[in-house]
Amino acid sequence: MTLHKAQFALFIAIAAFSLTGCSTEAPAKSSSSTLESSTTERQAKSSVGSALFNQQTYFLEKKAFAISFVALKEDSINTKDYSYRIILKPDKFKGVAVIATSKNPKLRSYTGVVYVVKSKQSENVTLSQLCETKAPSKVAPIAPKNPQRASDIIRCPAGSRSTFELLALGD
């Protein structure tokens, strides 16, 4: 299995967990507001994960990233708790960020990225990462830096953590 296929298979597995609402985190309290916050955060994380997957699919078909949710055939995904946006990183041929910014100070914010890099076989591969703020925040994490090689790991910035690693490690 090539590195690209292995990364894609891992991304599909992670996306499946994200989209089905599986969570590795138990609410700290058993109050209904904590459970509601956890559910709302999972929905935001799932929306960003879905948009990242759709961006990768779009890139495979068009050789460029979508600049809007409409282009991804997603209706407006803004909610009462989150506002969503797409930012090209640095342009539609190299990378894209999907950001979910919490409108509620009790919820985490999310930034997901997909970057295109050359593999050793000289073909383009996409690498993705989904970062969440470690604590509730109305400010989304800054987009992680673009990796230089297909073997590079995209690291979440200070004050945030990878939701992919949380799933893999069971934190």
Image: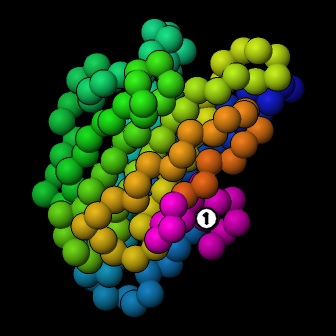
Q: Splitting the image into 4 quarters, where does residue 68 fall?
A: top left
Q: Nearer the viewer, residue 7 or 122?
A: 122
Q: Residue furthest left?
A: 80
Q: Nearer the viewer, residue 118 or 165?
A: 118
Task: Please report the residue visible at 35 percent of the width from the left and 22 percent of the height from the top.
Answer: 66
How far across and down, in percent of the image, does residue 164 sit?
Answer: 60, 55
How far across and down, in percent of the image, does residue 37 sit?
Answer: 30, 72
Task: Please report the residue visible at 26 percent of the width from the left and 77 percent of the height from the top.
Answer: 106
Magenta span contains residue 11 = no
Q: Which residues are magenta?
A: 157-171
The answer to whether 105 appears left or right of 22 in the picture is left
Seen in the picture, residue 18 relative to 114 is either above or below; the reply is below
Q: Amino acid at mark 1?
A: Leu
Q: Splitting the image into 4 quarters, where does residue 118 fall?
A: top right
The answer to whether 76 appears left or right of 121 in the picture is left
Image quarter of the C terminus: bottom right
Q: Splitting the image into 4 quarters, where does residue 138 fall?
A: bottom left
Task: Please report the residue visible at 37 percent of the width from the left and 31 percent of the height from the top.
Answer: 88
Seen in the picture, residue 157 relative to 7 is either above or below; the reply is below
Colouring: rainbow
Q: Secondary structure at mark 1?
A: helix
How far across and down, in percent of the image, does residue 15 sit?
Answer: 54, 43
Residue 16 visible (yes or no):
no
The answer to whether 36 appears left or right of 169 in the picture is left
How far across and down, in percent of the image, does residue 25 sit?
Answer: 52, 73
Q: Residue furthest right?
A: 1
> How many neighbours does mark 1 have within 10 angstroms: few (below 14), some (14-19), or many (20 or more)?
few
Q: Which residue is mark 1?
A: 166
